[in-house]
Amino acid sequence: MTTEKLRSRLPIKPLVGSVAALLLCSHAFGKPETSDITWLTAPSDNNWFNSSNWSPAIVPDNSGTTAHFDQSNITNPDLGDSFIQLGGITFNSGANAYTINVNDSSVQFWNTGIVNQSKVTQNIVVGGGSDGGGTIEFFNSATAGQNTTITLLGSVTGGEGSVVHFWDTSSAGGATIVAMGNGGTLSGNVGGGAGIYFLDDSTGGTAAIKVYGNGFLDISNHNPGSVMIGSLEGNGNVFVGSNNLAVGSNDRSTIFSGSIQDGGEGGGTGGSLTKIGTGTLTLTGINTYTGNTIINGGALIVDGVIASPFTFVNPGSTLGGHGIIGGSVINNGLVSPGNSPGTLTINGNYAQTSIGGLLIQVATHHTFDHLIIGGAASLSGTLYVQPLDIPKLKKGEKFQFLTAGGGVSGTFGEVVQDKSTLMRFKVKYGSNDVTLRTYVAPFTSIGGLTPNQQSVASALNQLTNDKNASKLINFLATQPIGNLSGDFDKLAAEEFTSIFTIGTSFDNVQSLTLQSYLDSLRSGTGYSAGGLALNGFSVNYAGPISFRTGAAGPNGDDGKSSKEVQQVAPAENRWGAFLTGTGQWVGVSDDFNARGYDIATGGFTLGVDYKVCSHCAVGIMAGYVGTSVDAADGGRVLVNGGKLGLYATMFQNRQPAPPASTGLSKDSSKESKQVVVPAEVDPGWYADIAVVGGYSSYDLHRSGLEGTARGDTDGGDLNVLFGAGYDFKRGNFTFGPTASFNYTYVGVGSFTESGSLAPLRIDSQGQESIRTAFGMKASYDWKVGGLLIKPELRAAWQHEYGDSAYALNSSFADGNAGNFTVWGPRIGRDSFLLGAGFAIQLSDRLSTYFYYDGELGRTRYDSHSVTGGVRLAF
């Protein structure tokens, strides 16, 4: 529609006023003037001009009258094609939702305008008749109200479309005003489009203005200055003349794909646009207005074209989009090219001040924001870098995000970027461009890492520039920082430190078991089931304990009433053998640095020894050990190994004490006999020594980074035992102090894992344990029927002199650097050793035994084991 045609539609206000006065007189003649008239609950029809539809029965039709609407069974009053004046229309509280059909009529509001108290949307439809468009006009301070929709239909006959005029200081309020294109549709080329006019000093308030097709908004006849509206949307036309249109007072986000241009019915050039409010206005069309664009609030997204010579982005506001800015941009707010992401073109210059910001979004190497500047770029303020798909970023990628044909001057004062990962951006300035380049921040910059995690992080720093490790580095650098400590745990392989705990814990139990066996060997039960036999008190394996009253020898009883008791040592078996089975369960708890694990071990030992003299015996032992370690996150270590060792014991050759007197005279005539309890034997010292070596194969798997890491290797261990003690014997009770020294070395061969994103290369290495134990033991020879039962109790304090946390040295298999050391849980150095059990003599050559040994009270460590076996003398 041409500007001339539009001008022909605009009423001349003085003429309208005169005609209105004349019409008022003619309308008022013979009619009582009533201020409030209400549409009936049950009117006879929908004819506005049927007085029987109103209460009182007067048609509301003068500038002092307000038409009220409540509940009604007819909610579509029709004005036909008449002309009426009203003070206003009020939709009372509780009213139905109405649709008032103005058709081709002309309605003027001179007082309150439209008041909606009903809390539902009320509709007024203008036009649609055969004679062209209807008209609504607001005068004085009348308003279009709140929650009201005024729909202006275009012409269907080639005439003019419907229009609404806001005169004087009237307001569109908070209404929604829709100007449709010709035919009342969004497209077509028949008839004229509907129009919305703001004139004099009227305002759009917070109204939502929608223009479609050749429907339009025209502010060109408004008094010089600015017209504010709530929002703008549609694909119609906006004529600003030489005025300013301020859009956004209702804070809504809308899209306008039509054209904002100079001219209109009032003519004029240099019209401008101001974006206000917190919402977003998106312009997708070609906008030719020749004044400036000012963004004071919210966001203006230009996905089309604006021709403004200057666009001002003020503090708290944003300019974005992938369109074209015809002139220059002065940025005191935020410029954000594209729509996540995209390219924004500025044909003129670009000046970013110290309070301005530029937001660049990066998705991939090929998809990121661009700011293309035809003129010169003057930089200051802040650069904001926002990665959109961090996992797709790689170290060393370049993103040329700004080009300026007129050159680049200045630099950004600050670069603000996402720091949720270690993938970061550096800025490089060229003469005509600015480029971002990705880099990886130090892994050690993360706070709150444990020593193990810190060790892994230091190793990763060494790998940052290693191409062989780029996949690992890129993966870790794009992970949320909060996840990295857990990832470092998966890289640490701290569960493999359990290898050293396996060796030392089982060797400790084996030493205790061997000492128990050597103790029985010294007492004689290792070679003779009866040990030291007593004349007059012996073990009968076929029946109960028997007492003999005669003296030993071929002559038998001499008939005297009393004889001295003689002690006789039985024939000695010099060879002995034993078979022992052991089960052990060890628990190592978490500490602040490493996660714990559980160890379950089972094995057997076979030994043969020979008593070379009355105070010395030597032997050889061999055995098998199988171990399973259950670590965190399903990690496991399986061990199969063999043991081979030598052992010896030396002890004092104790002789029986001289027999005690019976206390009976030779001339006693009593027939009863008295058995004298054997006298105490001399106490004795002893010393034990053993050297045991072992070979083990290891099958290992753990929960690695992005998969399971597996490996296998072998290793060996050496255990040296030296023990000593002193036995005191009181009758059948034996007790005394004990002391022992243990040295254990566990070594493991190097191996390389397979599987996972970061398999490790484990170095060949070993760990030592040096332990001493001081304590007491006690046992009792208990003769029950034909058996000798020997219960035993041991207690000792043990101290560890070696490392309290075992270390593991490793490196990354896929890199040329990155050696690091991690430690297992730190366990205590002091513990309480408790042993209890019993041996049973089954015959003069065969015995069996069962023992429990516990290592208790040690910080983050406890061990429980049971041992059972048989001994054979021959």
Image (cartoon, rainbow, N blue to C red):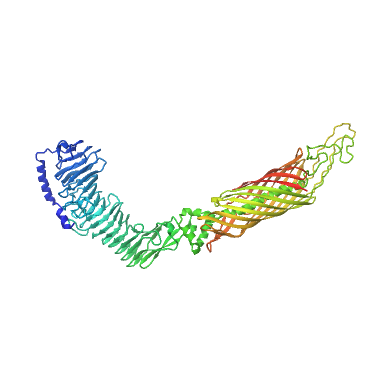
Q: Position of residue 855 (x, y in %)?
A: 64, 47
Q: Nearer the viewer, residue 645 or 184?
A: 184
Q: Position of residue 1 (x, y in %)?
A: 18, 56
Q: Is residue 178 above or below residue 563?
A: below
Query: Residue 549 occupies which quadrant of the picture?
Result: top right
Left or right: 497 with respect to 29? right
Q: Is residue 427 above or below residue 650?
A: below
Q: Position of residue 861 (x, y in %)?
A: 60, 48
Q: Nearer the viewer, residue 188 or 813?
A: 188
**Residue 327 in sight from this viewpoint:** yes
Query: Residue 847 occupies which quadrant of the picture?
Result: top right
Q: Position of residue 562 (x, y in %)?
A: 87, 35
Q: Is residue 176 above or below residue 549?
A: below
Left or right: 730 with respect to 131? right
The structure residue drawn at horizontal position 9% and vertical position 45%, both measured from the top left corner, is: 22
**Residue 466 in sight from this viewpoint:** no
Q: Which residue is at the far top?
A: 670
Labels in figure, total: 0
Left or right: 850 with respect to 322? right
The structure residue drawn at horizontal position 68% and vertical position 54%, both measured from the top left corner, is: 643
